Amino acid sequence: MDQLNRLGTELVDEAIDFADELGIAEYRLDNETTVLDFGVEHAGGVEAGLMLTEIQTAGLASVTTRLESVGDAALPHVEVTTDHPALALLAGQKAGWELATEDFEGLGSGPARALVAREEIFERLEYVEAFDFAVLAVESDALPTEAAAAQVADLAGVPESSVFLPAFSTASITGSVAAGARASESAVFQLFELGYDPEDVHSVSGVAPVAPVAESEEAAIARTNDVLAYGGRVHLTVESEFDRFEEIPSTAGEEYSQPFAEIFEDADWDFEELPAEVFGPAQVTVDVIGGETAVYGETDEALLVESFGL
């Protein structure tokens, strides 16, 4: 299998070729880093969100949408399926890079994380890449700066001209799609946190609503977390039994049934103060190969109706 950054670079090239159709724009910084505006100053859209998710997962996941209901409203739902969950979701899609310079702050996800490989995820997977290009999707309400690009280049070990930064705000159509696409990743990461070997997860399918775009970045962050914790549904096919499967969904946390706007406010918006279980999907079906199939957790449609203002 090709390296994540090679696959991600090919998808970035495709996005550039279809920038007009996707409603995105390509920029070159003075240091020759390529920034792709997927939903900061440009509108982006549903197709842009699907393409962004493909870039984050390095093309190792199938990403589709369908129309389902939340309350009385018909809303798009995004579904992500992969037979390579450890690489696609943990080494790729997981937002594990806190990008911070004097003039920029953002949250990074995507293949470039594997070039740095300092997160515990990569130690457990024993996975690290060396490649000529780096692709890091950046979630922020501002476009990346030269200083931010330089930081990525330095840590990834590539020239600044070899860095690609697809950027999007949470409060955008692209951001809503990308957030809903994290249901599968949230389940696999919960298993990782609980001590289950992520390489024993063979296949994952997850679906969640695409939240209406909120009026501010903070409101969007809260609403898109509600999407996963109260509307995300995931199916896992795994190798072996585990006595903590019931702890995967958000229902395992004491905060369940509380909107994330309140959860974040109570924590002063310090995400590190929150227990990991609040970020699980609402419901998980675990299918053990040759064993039992069991359902854990439940969705809360009424809370989503309230969160979305329906």
Image (cartoon, helix red, strand yellow):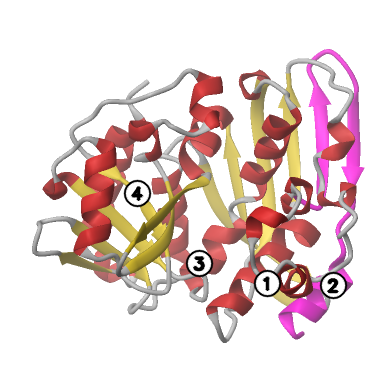
The three-letter amino acid code for the residue at tag 2 is Leu
Q: CA distance from mark 1 to mark 2?
A: 10 Å
The stretch of residues the image draws in magenta is 281-310
Counting residues from the start of the chain, the first of labels 2 and 3 encountered is 3
Magenta segment includes 308: yes
Mark 1 and mark 2 in contact? Answer it, CB < 8 Å.
no
Question: How far apart are the two marked residues, 1 and 4, measured between alpha carbons?
Answer: 24 Å
Disc on res. 136: 4
First in sequence: mark 1 vs mark 4: 4
**Mark 4 surroundings within 10 Å by alpha-carbon count, few (fewer than 14), some (14 through 19), many (20 or more):** many
Residue denoted by label 2? 303
Relative to 104, does residue 201 appear above or below in the rendering? above
Q: Name the image quarter holding residue 27.
A: bottom left
Q: Residue 175, labelled with which disc?
A: 3
Give the CA distance from mark 3 to mark 4: 15 Å
Residue wearing tag 1: 223
Magenta-span inclusion, residue 19:
no
Residue 36 in the image: state x and y as whole percent.
Answer: 27, 62
Residue at left offset 85%, top offset 38%? 247
Residues packed near mark 2 inside 10 Å, few (<14), some (14 to 19) or many (20 plus): some
Q: CA distance from mark 3 to mark 1?
A: 11 Å
Task: Quote the CA–CA distance across marks 2 and 3.
Answer: 20 Å
| 308 in relation to 22, above or below | below
Q: Split into 4 quadrants, where in the image is the N terminus?
A: top left
Relative placement, left or right, of 213 versus 150 is right
- Does residue 103 appear to the left or right of 30 in the view shown? right
Question: Is residue 29 shown above or below 162?
Answer: below
| Disc 4, SS | loop
**Percent position of residue 293, x then y:** 88, 28
Q: Earlier in the sequence, mark 3 or mark 4?
A: 4
